[in-house]
Image (cartoon, helix red, strand yellow):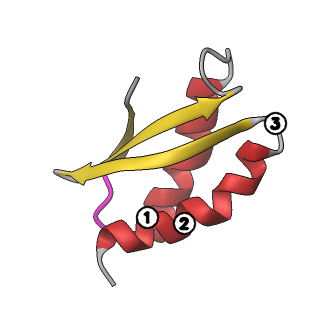
Amino acid sequence: MTIEQQIELTLMKIRPFIQRDGGDISLVKFEDGFVHVKMHGACVGCSLQDQTLRQGVEVILMDEIPGILGVKLID
């Protein structure tokens, strides 16, 4: 399984929690150890977007998949 596939599987686990608040997240690319994601729906412009990304998505991805250095948000 590629690292991109591992990221997608992990995002599938996270996605329901984001969707329940009217948002969504998608993988844009994995490059140089960083996962680049795009937020959609209610997440766009939300004051908790950075907190969700750093304390939720990034922590889970880094815990579950070796080699991930962080998550970057693509506007």
Q: Which residue is denoted by mark 2 in the rendering? A: 10
| Residue 70 position (above or below residue 40) | below
Kindly identify the residue that appears in the image at 42 percent across and 73 percent down: 6
Q: Is residue 3 left or right of residue 52?
A: left
Q: Which residue is denoted by mark 3 in the rendering? A: 21
Where residue 49 sits, quadrant-wise, is top right
Residue 59: % across, % down: 53, 51
Kindly identify the residue that appears in the image at 66 percent across and 54 percent down: 15
Report helix, strand or loop for mark 2: helix
| Residue 67 position (above or below residue 1) | above
| Quadrant that contains the N terminus | bottom left
Count neighbours of disc 2 (C-alpha within 10 A) and say few if under 14, some if 14 to 19, many if 20 or more: some
Kindly identify the residue that appears in the image at 29 percent across and 50 percent down: 29
- Please tell me whether mark 3 or mark 2 is closer to you in this view: 3
Q: Amino acid at mark 3?
A: Asp
Dot label at residue 51: none
Q: Amino acid at mark 2?
A: Thr
Report helix, strand or loop for mark 1: helix
Q: Looking at this view, is 12 or 61 the one in front?
A: 12
